[in-house]
Amino acid sequence: MMELGAYSFGDTQRNPDGSLRPTAEAIGNLFAAIVLADQAGLDYFGVGEHHTLDMPASSPGTVIAAAAAATRRIKLGSGASIISTDDPVRVFQQFSTADAISGGRVEITAGRGSSVETFPLFGFDLDDYDRLYAEKLELLMAINDSPTANVSWSGTVRAPIHDLAVVPRPVHGKLPIWLATGGSAPSSARAGKLGLPISYGIIGGAPARFAPLANLYRASAAQAGHAGENIKVSVAALGLIAPTKQEALDRFYPGWYNLNIGMGKLRGWPAPDRRAFLAQAEAPGAYYVGDPDEVAARIVDLHGHMGHMRHFLQMDIGSLPQEHFLESLTLLATEVKPRVERLLAGK
């Protein structure tokens, strides 16, 4: 079965003069989108962690806890939690609390984060980037894997824990913990060796080029003796669905342009190029922008390369109008999902 869903960092709308609207409104819009995604029949919604005016979803666990009480079926997770600059004890507590509210539908995706604003914000040194991630992932797994509520752990990046209770415990004993990666071979091997499911963020290039990484992940898992339902792959990508391909392109491009202008100022990216956008929005590019038939066919094509079991899209970027976001979520659930199921069943 292929699970379909969406993820968001929150998307702050703009006034007619181009100024940003309140970030509180963005969080309200995100909450409404999750509720609609559940009602429409999507399988998964991820809330990513960012700390900027245009992407203000800085506390995924809080949004997920609220959504847990307002939804009935959809799986909810972080996409991703930046554990390098957070406390794994608190992350676990927040998500297991949301899990209790949801009845057991909550997951954690643990990542390093492609943005580094959390390091100065929370007082961490970028020189400790790798050590922070490795040790905090180890602690998060130790808490999750503990057979009792009491946990012991020691490392170099935080105070040790000596037989202390970390509560509440998840509904089903453990939370699903995914490892997020933008496509590094060491991260793929790490996830396999740890026996964690892996989530690939594919935001450029041809998605099929990630197939060797998925193969490396599965081979690393097998070599470490991990097998079963926990060895699985998901794909996060950019995309938007509309009734027609042209509508999808016309709706998505302004937000893509705004996003790239903003990120260019932070990271030194070149000016946005519409030709580059259009190239990525056509197969075999990384953007799943189109009508339901095209998006479904492209998801199934990638499944043939990667064998992934979940495909979820970031749609609300660069102040995409909320009504277009909600329509895209509805089309993904009601039009794309049945097409994907039929195409996979026919293989």
Image (cartoon, rainbow, N blue to C red):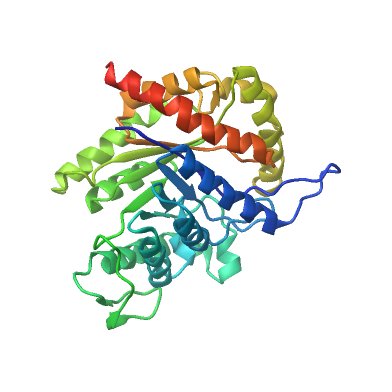
Question: As drawn, is 292 to the left or to the right of 249?
Answer: left
**Viewer-proximal residue, 34 or 143?**
34
Residue 343 location, x and y as percent?
Answer: 34, 18
Q: Residue at x 57, y 60 (%)?
A: 58
- Assign the C terminus to one quadrant of the image: top left
Question: As drawn, is 303 to the left or to the right of 124?
Answer: left
Identify the residue at the far right of this view: 17
**Viewer-proximal residue, 214 or 172?**
172
Dividing the picture into quadrants, the one containing residue 213 is top left
Residue 206 appearing in the image: no
Residue 318 location, x and y as percent?
Answer: 68, 41
- Assign the N terminus to one quadrant of the image: top left
Question: As drawn, is 218 to the left or to the right of 119?
Answer: left
Residue 23 in the image: above or below residue 143: above
**Viewer-proximal residue, 268 or 251?**
251
Residue 288 in the image: above or below residue 23: above
Q: Residue at x 41, y 51 (%)?
A: 72
